[in-house]
């Protein structure tokens, strides 16, 4: 995903949300992300372009996760406006076949749906809405039929990357078409998006959207409010698209772990993602804040943040216009940090993930957790897999 910037929480955060129950709560969602961008989790470099080896690797992954008690897979199927599934809209991913646009001998998403459901696991199709490339990927490697070349007017550049312009109705409509296509043709359980809406800020680099704002401010006088509204329109449209196509398919989002209560990076002020508004308006069915810090962290305390999100989601649900369909809260957790030589001592001594899982069960409103990401998890650092299995076996 990304390197997480340090934040400083307001001193009042803990006092507002420190009270917790001593009862043990049941969690219903036990998830794991499988990232395909840059072959983070799957397929391995050896398996690129090799269908049988890809399936063998994924079979091992799914069996291993199932043995831990995992019941939901968040599988990245659209990392850079490309596809790990059959699509007439966007080209096959080069992380799957070695060359963008090259067709494999099977449909990974269709195959994954069958494999997950046969193991009583949910399959959540993970899409990145705006991103066209990552910093190490040149746009001249994109296939000729990539939307970047078919509709160059839809995109802008920021740093070393290109993005769909969030201000353009045509770009939003395209993203909704992609979502609709997946929901209609695949027996998935959810559409999932992570924290990449507006790009993470680059020091001393302004976003290239002042001309768009001047052309159509839609009544806004502050460009920051206008940017948040651009994302709000996209999220609402995606939600409507999903639920019109199949009301049984959920829409979940995994935001950065801090909303706006801090002096460092936040969703609201830096990524222009107003998550609480989306919950309040009933646009998303679940939220998975990425709480990738340790308990007691001086700048971002996992315990304080877990309480904050539980209270915030509960408050939004009570105010929601769709009160009979509350948004669920799952916590995004970071086993990839365990045992790292450069990590804080909390990640190198004992098992921080086990501590956090046990804490989750004392906080009313936390309905589950999700681990990022699968490859480092299955390496079993500090025996984390044994801990996860033991805790899940308790309830």
Image (cartoon, helix red, strand yellow):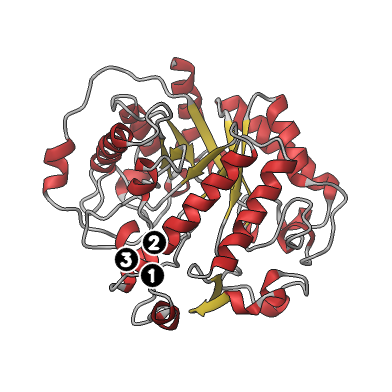
Tell me the CA gap for discs 3 and 1: 11 Å
Q: Which residue is mark 3?
A: 225
Badges 3 and 2: C-beta atoms under 8 Å apart?
yes
Quadrant the C terminus occupies = top left
Q: Left or right: 137 with respect to 222?
A: right
248 and 56: which is toward the camera:
248
Q: Left or right: 43 with respect to 34?
A: right
Residue 92, which numbered label? none
37 and 174: which is toward the camera:
174
Badges 2 and 1: C-beta atoms under 8 Å apart?
yes
Tell me the CA gap for discs 2 and 1: 10 Å
Is residue 266 visible to us here? no
Q: Residue at x 48, y 70 (%)?
A: 167
Q: Is residue 267 above or below residue 212?
A: above
Residue 110 percent coordinates (x, y): 76, 40
Q: Left or right: 382 with respect to 69?
A: left
Residue 249 percent coordinates (x, y): 59, 35
Q: Which residue is mark 2?
A: 229
Q: Which residue is mark 1?
A: 218
Q: Residue at x 67, y 75 (%)?
A: 151
Q: Left or right: 67 with respect to 96?
A: left
């Amino acid at each position: 995903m990304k390197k997480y910037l340090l934040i400083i929480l307001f001193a009042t955060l803990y006092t507002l949300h420190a009270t917790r129950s001593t009862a043990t709560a049941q969690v219903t969602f036990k998830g794991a992300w499988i990232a395909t961008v840059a072959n983070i989790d799957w397929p391995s470099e050896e398996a690129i372009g090799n269908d049988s080896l890809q399936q063998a690797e994924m079979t091992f992954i799914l069996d291993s996760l199932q043995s831990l008690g995992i019941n939901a897979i968040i599988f990245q199927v659209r990392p850079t406006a490309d596809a790990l599934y059959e699509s007439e809209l966007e080209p096959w991913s080069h992380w799957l076949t070695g060359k963008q646009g090259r067709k494999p001998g099977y449909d990974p998403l269709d195959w994954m749906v069958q494999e997950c459901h046969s193991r009583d696991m949910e399959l959540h199709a993970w899409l990145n809405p705006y991103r066209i490339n990552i910093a190490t990927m040149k746009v001249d490697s994109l296939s000729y039929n990539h939307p970047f070349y078919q509709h160059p007017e839809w995109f802008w550049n920021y740093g070393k990357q290109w993005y769909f312009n969030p201000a353009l109705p045509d770009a939003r409509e395209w993203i909704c078409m992609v979502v609709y296509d997946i929901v209609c043709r695949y027996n998935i359980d959810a559409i999932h998006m992570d924290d990449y809406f507006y790009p993470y800020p680059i020091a001393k680099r302004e976003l290239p959207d002042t001309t768009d704002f001047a052309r159509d401010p839609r009544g806004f006088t502050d460009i920051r409010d206008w940017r948040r509204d651009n994302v709000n329109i996209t999220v609402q449209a995606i939600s409507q698209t999903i639920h019109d196509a199949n009301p049984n398919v959920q829409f979940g989002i995994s935001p950065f772990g801090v909303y706006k209560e801090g002096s460092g990076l936040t969703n609201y002020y830096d990524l222009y993602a107003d998550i609480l508004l989306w919950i309040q308006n009933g646009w998303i069915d679940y939220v998975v804040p990425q709480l990738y810090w340790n308990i007691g962290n001086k700048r971002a305390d996992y315990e304080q943040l877990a309480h904050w999100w539980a209270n915030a989601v509960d408050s939004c649900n009570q105010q929601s216009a769709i009160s009979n369909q509350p948004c669920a809260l799952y916590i995004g957790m970071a086993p990839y940090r365990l045992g790292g030589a450069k990590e804080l001592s909390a990640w190198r001594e004992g098992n921080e993930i086990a501590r956090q899982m046990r804490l989750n069960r004392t906080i009313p409103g936390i309905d589950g957790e999700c681990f990022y990401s699968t490859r480092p998890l299955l390496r079993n650092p500090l025996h984390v897999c044994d801990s996860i299995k033991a805790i899940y076996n308790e309830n």
